[in-house]
Amino acid sequence: MSFKYLIFDLGNVIITNDWFDKYSKVFKIPNKLAWKVYTTYWTRLKEGSITEEEFWKLFLIDAKLKITLKKAKELWREEQKPIENMFELLKKLKKNYKLVALTNIGDGWLEFKREKYGLDKYFKKIFASCEMHAYKPNPEVYKNVLKDLKVMGEECIFIDDKQRGLSPARKLRIHAIQFKGQKGLEKELRELGIKF
């Protein structure tokens, strides 16, 4: 079976996604508190039921941070950086395969990453949880992606950093790879006969 689509998660695969440490250090709040407050509102953000503005307002109130909404957004954006040389790898892969992204993300965060890194240059389509109003690991998300792309699971490879995001993909016969670094990913792709 030859692969037609390579499906990538964005956070911690293409672009870093770790900003809790910075908030903890800068504002001297426990990392545990930052995580607790974040997870309280993250589900609503990623499913598209609240905007990024609403997320940060709620986050700042619950974390008792006395900073502006603008500053909170800036700090988050400063921590979004490319992982290794993943954009170079995408450029090479794009020559022979169709690339799409499947990511749990909020509206403003997607817009920022899209503009800053020119994601549309690399990906034929971005399946964003905030636009689908459903998120990984919901099996329906993967079914809808396959339906939209008009392909069978066997014709796709999905790369995600979280194991829980890979299990539903495997059940649909999508070849799933857990991202642990670029070198490891390149090795696994070559073993599958992917040319780049």
Image (cartoon, rainbow, N blue to C red):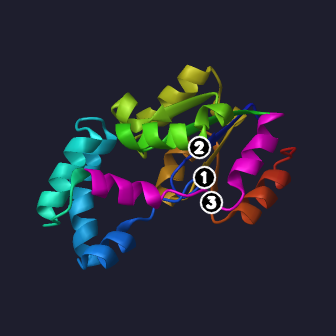
Mark earlier in primary sequence (3, 1): 1
For marks 3 and 1, give the CA distance: 5 Å
In-front residue for pair 127/31: 31
For marks 2 and 3, give the CA distance: 12 Å
Q: Which residue is mark 1?
A: 14
Check if mark 3's residue and mark 1's residue have beta carbons within 8 Å: yes
Q: What is the three-letter code of the residue carrying label 2?
A: Tyr
Image quarter (top left, top right, bottom left or bottom right) of the N terminus: top right
Q: What is the three-letter code of the residue carrying label 1?
A: Ile
In-front residue for pair 116/95: 116
Label 2 sits on a secondary structure element that is: helix
Image quarter (top left, top right, bottom left or bottom right) of the C terminus: top right
Please state if 193 lies on the left or on the right of 85 as rendered. right
Q: Main secondary structure of the magenta part?
A: helix
Label 3 sits on a secondary structure element that is: loop
Q: Position of residue 132 (x, y in %)?
A: 39, 29
Check if mark 1's residue and mark 2's residue have beta carbons within 8 Å: yes
Is 144 covered by the magenta stretch?
no
Q: Which residue is mark 2?
A: 117
Q: Which residue is mark 3?
A: 83
Q: Position of residue 125 (x, y in %)?
A: 58, 28
Is 72 covered by the magenta stretch?
yes
Mark earlier in primary sequence (2, 3): 3
Question: What residue range appears in magenta?
Answer: 70-96
Residue at left 31%, top 38%?
47
Can I make out residue 26 in this image? yes
Mark earlier in primary sequence (1, 2): 1
Image mark for residue 47? none
Please state if 92 lies on the left or on the right of 51 as rendered. right
